[in-house]
């Protein structure tokens, strides 16, 4: 069993990297992290033993039923659930044969625990004022508070029914916490913390077991150094157009500059961004590498874009390979 991990940055990290820079969307397609799991598309969910196991199993079914790729549902759900049949490979095999499924998901909820950590918050209050209303004596008071922490750990597995092979198994964990003091209400309920942990784990499992679509961001370089004044104004206008979502106008402007200034690294790079946004990852990579070779100094945006384009090309190749193997 081989598990791949595709380089996909989370929204928070993307914002951190981009800062206030202009970015454009790149529509990306990635294969499942586990290529052995992806071909099994007629599936059902059996038991997940342990605390909150049933809750997790029903949420797992909902995730599989709504999973899509390229705008189409990826899975065909073969049954409404195999609760009570047991959470082992033998039970999963019997269940899978009964409903003629390709694969059966099952597993074990190892932990679904709440822990409480009491603490105090110090408040300083005025306990005496003079005749003018000015505080002349303060005292410290301590309010009891509680930090409540939830931890979930689950071991999901996927059994291939035709040969009884467990083709996917993983250990996933997630958690949540909240805190409040006396006189306040619990801000995040226990049910909300459980649901949040379940959703975090299922989102991670989703990318393991099936191909998926996502949105990446490519950063536009806004530097005009090395350009004549007239071209620099056009370049700035193109950056503004890209920032407003008019990438077509921006790309035409950068193309015009590139014809006049073919050695300008930042224009070359931005044309690469245009190619990447249009799905031409090989063309984008060639332009990024040309920009890197002609740039006056090392640039992190270029390095990151080269790595991203290489990753997208590898993902395309893996998806083609997977498609051919299914025929």
Image (cartoon, helix red, strand yellow):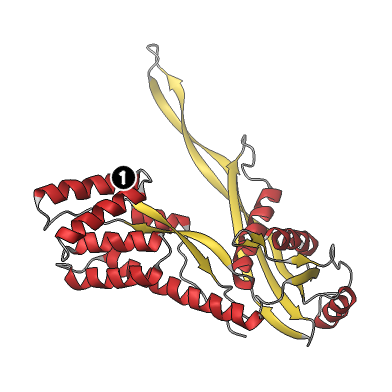
Rendered view: 210 above or below 224 = below
- The vertical placement of 301 against 236, above or below, is below
Where's residue 269, x and y in %?
26, 63
Describe residue 80's horizontal placement relative to residue 260 as left or right: right
* Horizontal arrangement in the rendering, residue 310 relative to residue 53 (left or right): left
Q: Is residue 279 above or below residue 128?
A: below
Residue 249 spot, x, y in % from top left:
31, 48
| Residue at x 24%, y 55% (from the top left corner) | 254
Q: Quadrant of the N terminus?
A: bottom right
Corner quadrant of residue 308: bottom left
| Relative side of 68 to 274, left or right | right
Name the residue: 41% across, 60% down: 278
Looking at the rendered structure, the secondary structure element under dot 1 is helix
Give the left or right position of residue 316, taking residue 308 as reference.
right
Number of residue marks: 1
Residue 49 can be seen in this image: no
Q: Which residue is mark 1?
A: 241
Q: Can the viewer see residue 87?
A: yes
| Corner quadrant of residue 305 | bottom left
Where residue 58 appears, as percent x and y from the top left, is 78, 60
Q: Quadrant of the C terminus?
A: bottom right
- Give the residue at x 53% y 39%: 142
**Residue closer to the observer: 112 or 192:** 192
């Amino acid at each position: 069993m081989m598990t791949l991990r595709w380089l996909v940055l989370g929204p928070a990290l993307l914002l951190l990297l981009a800062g206030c820079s202009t970015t454009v969307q790149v529509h990306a397609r990635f294969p499942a992290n586990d290529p052995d799991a992806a071909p099994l598309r007629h599936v059902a969910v059996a038991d997940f033993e342990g605390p909150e196991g049933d809750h997790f199993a029903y949420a797992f079914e909902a995730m599989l039923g709504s999973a899509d790729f390229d705008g189409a549902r990826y899975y065909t759900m073969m049954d409404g659930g195999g609760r009570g049949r047991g959470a082992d490979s033998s039970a999963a095999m019997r269940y899978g044969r009964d409903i003629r499924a390709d694969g059966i998901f099952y597993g074990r909820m190892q932990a679904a625990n709440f822990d409480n950590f009491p603490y105090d918050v110090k408040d300083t209050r005025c306990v005496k004022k003079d005749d003018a209303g000015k505080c002349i004596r303060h005292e410290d008071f301590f309010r009891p508070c509680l930090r409540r922490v939830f931890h979930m750990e689950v071991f999901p597995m996927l059994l291939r029914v035709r040969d009884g092979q467990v083709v996917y198994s993983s250990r996933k964990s997630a958690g949540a916490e909240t805190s409040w003091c006396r006189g306040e209400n619990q801000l995040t309920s226990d049910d909300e913390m459980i649901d949040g942990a379940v959703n975090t784990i299922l989102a991670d499992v989703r990318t393991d077991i099936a191909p998926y679509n996502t949105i990446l961001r490519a950063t536009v370089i806004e530097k005009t150094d090395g350009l004549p004044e007239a071209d620099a104004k056009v370049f700035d206008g193109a950056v503004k157009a890209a920032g407003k979502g008019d990438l077509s106008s921006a790309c035409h402007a950068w193309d015009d500059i590139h014809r006049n200034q073919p050695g300008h690294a930042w224009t070359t790079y931005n044309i690469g961004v245009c190619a990447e946004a249009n799905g031409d990852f090989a063309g984008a990579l060639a332009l990024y590498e040309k920009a890197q070779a002609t740039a006056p100094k090392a640039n992190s945006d270029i390095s990151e874009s080269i790595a991203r384009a290489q990753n997208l090309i590898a993902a395309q190749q893996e998806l083609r390979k997977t498609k051919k193997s299914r025929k």
